[in-house]
Image: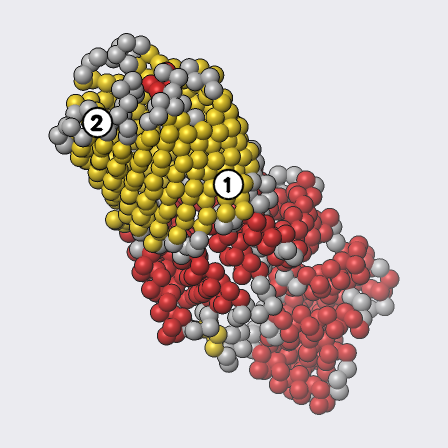
């Protein structure tokens, strides 16, 4: 035995010699020494095989201890436990009997037995280091991870241990306890690689943004840059690369940055790996916000199929997105089906399971249904639902007041909308951001730029973070713009004109000031065929619109540059009394309503007019007005009109608008007048407009219009005749900046008792910049 301690070769030689000796003699003392030497060399299997068939009652104390250890190291835990128990029974003063039994029972998941033997050990041998190590070993296998985390952390605080530090780091990573991870990286920098540091930085970024739907833009941008730095330092085959790109894409979506979302989505596609559902969902969110509801809906529905297959139901969060995408696509019945699938309780437990709280999903589902009523054209139902909530369920609910205020403003009930938003302010407490946002929106609906600007200017930095939609709308409303309109009419009967009647008109508007004022340039051109010649008129002018809500003033001055070579001046003023009544007063010198045939005779005009409009919600408008026009040839044209329009029907994509108009005109009998100048005339018309809205991807919306008009015209000294018109046209919203509309039609008009038939077409284009 002394010889075996001189080195490895001597140990090997000693084992060989003792093995031969044991085979010859079978001596128990030789066996004891042989097993001890084999254990020292780590030859556990050989140690076991020295006397595998021996009766354990014949083993010495040393043999029991060594063989128990050999069986344990060879993963034969039942045999190891048998030997340790025998050791503790036969040699009760050997602490390794109880200690070994406890450790092996832990490995056999017999935790009660392990705890029992540890208790016996402590009672007999005290709470020494071996006891503490065995206790920790038992706790490592039985404690919840959070308890284990705290215990390991305390152990490391008391005594540095690199091996335990690595175990603690792995557990902290699993539990996403970033402070402990950061602490360990600082205390044991040599234990961690750059890969570990990258994962830690990634975890810290995600932790800083996860679950915070109200995170400020500055925080989102900071997180985006930190993820970008991680991505730039990695190769594409690094697992963290893909994970970081996915998470950066989620951030880009929260930032409403379409270009960045698409960039990361294309990177992920190039990796040729299946994208997780949350990435697909974020991409669909971007598509929906960008005006591609059909593409978004396709992705959401695939995700819903996956959830249904895996969880036997669709999550409420995804149902909300399916409702919004279906509604934007015009599939309102489908949206209602999704809405009806939401089954949320009114209250939920808090994390302590002791207090009941309002369920935010229940609340969102309520407002989602209100929105559906509104979007489907049933604003009255949406209003009734909110009023019932405020009257019978939650009288002091500021969110319901704000929602009702928004609805009322969309129905032109701006006065009530302001009353509601002011009332909501009293229940919102210190956070008045939503009150300010809604007040600004109402002001913009009214055209009150000064009030909207005042609200926006007084935003705190924090309020501006949540005011993105309001600020965007304010900026869009202030954009400059260009509009162009064209009209052509071809007379088919009587066929006494050699060419078509044509008109074109252009406006170039400056951007609005903060209070809504703007300047503009105006050009118009008309070509009117007569029996003998083609009359051409061109005018160009400049003007300004001054917004002093509730008063506004439009001033324009210019000059004719073809046929009409005189200057002109137009003044139009308006006053908004309240949400129902609006008044207008206008005056013109050589205005645009001067007949072109009169201008050809060098006859010019001056006119003044007054009008008023009554608006009842978004359903009915009634207007009336008078005008007096003085011609240079001493003619005095007096006009009176009365009109009404109504949105008769709206459901989902369909809408029907109807109107009626009555006109009366009286002129002096001027023998030299070449222009149309009936002594007296009256006309009544009934009009209808059936429209169908057709949303598409990429922000495109097409609205079809089928219009009809029937009327009866009576001119003095002529019998009454019927008139009519029919047309079909399209309105295109190409982007938020570009709109295009056109129509073709046919109409019948009456002049001096004779019918005139025309085919006509109109085109209108508007672009804001």
Residue 150: x and y in percent read: 69, 72
Check the image and name the residue furthest to the bottom: 123
Q: In this orientation, does residue 183 appear? A: yes
Horizontal side of residue 428 vs 57, given as left or right: left
**How many numbered marks, from 0 up?**
2
Q: Is residue 427 positioned above or below 123 on the image?
A: above
Q: Residue at x 55, y 37 (%)?
A: 518
Horizontal side of residue 356 vs 701, given as left or right: right
Q: Looking at the image, is mark 1 or mark 2 earlier in the sequence? A: 1
Q: Residue at x 35, y 69 (%)?
A: 388
Q: Residue at x 66, y 55 (%)?
A: 461
Q: Secondary structure beneath disc 2?
A: strand
Horizontal side of residue 466 vs 658, given as left or right: right
Alpha carbon of mark 1 to alpha carbon of mark 2: how far?
35 Å
Residue 651: x and y in percent read: 27, 49
Residue 303: x and y in percent read: 41, 50
Horizontal side of residue 279 vs 732, given as left or right: right
Q: Decide: few, some or many residues near mark 2? Use Cα within 10 Å; few <14, some 14-19, many ≥20.
A: some
Q: Is residue 315 positioned above or below 62 on the image?
A: above
Q: Decide: few, some or many residues near mark 1? Use Cα within 10 Å; few <14, some 14-19, many ≥20.
A: some
Residue annotated with mark 2: 749
Q: Secondary structure beneath disc 1?
A: strand
Q: Residue at x 63, y 55 (%)?
A: 459
Q: In this orientation, does residue 209 appear? A: no
CB within 8 Å, label 1 to label 2? no
Question: In which image quadrant can residue 729 be found?
Answer: top left
Q: Is residue 105 positioned above or below 381 on the image?
A: below
**Residue 553 numbered mark, or none:** 1
């Amino acid at each position: 035995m002394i010889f075996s301690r001189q080195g490895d070769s001597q140990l090997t030689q000693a084992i060989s010699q003792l093995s031969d000796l044991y085979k010859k003699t079978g001596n128990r003392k030789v066996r004891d020494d042989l097993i001890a030497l084999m254990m020292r060399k780590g030859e556990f299997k050989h140690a076991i095989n020295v006397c595998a068939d021996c009766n354990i009652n014949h083993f010495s104390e040393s043999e029991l201890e060594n063989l128990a250890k050999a069986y344990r190291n060879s993963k034969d835990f039942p045999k190891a436990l048998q030997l340790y128990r025998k050791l503790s029974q036969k040699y009760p003063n050997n602490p390794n009997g109880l200690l070994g039994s406890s450790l092996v029972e832990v490995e056999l998941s017999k935790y009660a037995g392990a705890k029992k033997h540890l208790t016996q050990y402590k009672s007999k041998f005290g709470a020494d280091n071996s006891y503490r190590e065995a206790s920790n070993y038992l706790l490592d296998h039985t404690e919840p991870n959070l308890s284990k985390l705290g215990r390991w952390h305390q152990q490391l605080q008391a005594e540095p241990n690199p091996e335990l530090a690595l175990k603690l780091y792995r557990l902290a990573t699993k539990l996403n306890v970033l402070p402990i991870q950061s602490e360990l990286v600082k205390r044991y920098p040599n234990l961690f690689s750059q890969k570990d540091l990258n994962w830690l930085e990634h975890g810290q970024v995600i932790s800083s943004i996860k679950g915070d739907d109200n995170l400020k833009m500055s925080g989102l941008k900071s997180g985006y840059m930190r993820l970008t730095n991680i991505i730039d330092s990695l190769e594409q085959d690094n697992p963290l690369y893909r994970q970081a790109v996915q998470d950066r894409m989620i951030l880009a979506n929260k930032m409403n940055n379409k270009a960045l979302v698409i960039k990361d989505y294309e990177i992920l596609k190039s990796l040729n790996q299946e994208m997780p559902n949350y990435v697909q969902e974020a991409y669909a969110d971007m598509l929906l916000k960008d005006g591609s509801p059909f593409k978004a809906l396709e992705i959401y529905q695939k995700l819903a199929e996956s959830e249904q297959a895996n969880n036997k139901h669709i999550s409420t969060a995804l149902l909300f997105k399916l409702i919004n995408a279906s509604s934007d696509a015009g599939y309102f019945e489908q949206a209602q089906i999704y809405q009806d699938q939401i089954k949320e309780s009114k209250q939920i437990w808090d994390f302590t399971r002791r207090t009941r709280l309002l369920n935010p999903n229940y609340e969102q589902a309520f407002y989602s249904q209100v929105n559906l009523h509104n979007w489907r054209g049933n604003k009255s139902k949406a209003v009734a639902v909110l009023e019932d909530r405020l009257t019978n369920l939650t009288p002091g609910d500021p969110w319901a007041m704000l929602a009702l205020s928004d609805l009322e403003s969309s129905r032109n009930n701006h006065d009530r909308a302001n009353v509601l938003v002011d009332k909501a302010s009293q229940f919102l407490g210190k956070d008045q951001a939503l009150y300010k946002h809604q007040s600004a929106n109402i002001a913009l609906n009214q055209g009150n730029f000064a009030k909207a600007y005042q609200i926006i200017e007084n935003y705190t930095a924090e309020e501006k973070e949540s005011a993105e939609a309001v600020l965007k709308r304010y900026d869009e409303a202030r954009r400059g713009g260009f509009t162009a309109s064209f009209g052509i009419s071809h007379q088919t009967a009587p066929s006494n004109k050699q060419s078509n009647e044509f008109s074109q008109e252009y406006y170039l508007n400056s951007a609005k000031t903060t209070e809504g004022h703007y300047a503009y340039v105006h050009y118009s051109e008309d070509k009117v065929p007569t029996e003998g010649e083609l009359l051409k008129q061109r005018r160009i002018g400049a003007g300004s619109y001054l917004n002093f809500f509730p008063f506004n003033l439009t001033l324009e001055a210019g000059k004719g540059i073809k046929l009409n070579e005189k200057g002109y001046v137009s003044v139009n003023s308006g006053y908004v009394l309240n949400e129902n009544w609006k008044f207008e007063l206008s005056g013109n010198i050589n205005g645009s309503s001067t007949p072109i045939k009169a201008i050809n005779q060098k006859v010019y005009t001056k006119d003044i007019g007054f009008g008023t409009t009554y608006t009842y919600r978004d359903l009915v408008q009634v207007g009336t007005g008078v005008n007096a026009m003085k011609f240079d040839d001493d003619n005095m044209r007096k006009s009176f009109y009365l009109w009404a329009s109504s949105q008769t029907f709206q459901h989902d994509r369909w809408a029907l608008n109807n109107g009626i108009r009555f006109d009366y005109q009286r002129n002096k009998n001027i023998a030299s007048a070449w222009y149309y100048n009936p002594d007296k005339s009256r006309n009544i018309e009934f009009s209808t407009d059936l429209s169908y809205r057709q949303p598409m991807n990429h922000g495109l919306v097409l609205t079809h219009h089928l219009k009809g008009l029937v009327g009866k015209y009576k001119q003095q000294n002529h019998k009454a005749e019927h008139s009519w018109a029919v047309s079909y046209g399209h309105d295109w919203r190409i982007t938020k900046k570009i709109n295009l509309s056109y129509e073709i039609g046919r109409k019948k008009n009456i002049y001096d008792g004779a019918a005139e038939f025309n085919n006509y077409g109109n085109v209108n284009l508007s672009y804001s910049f």
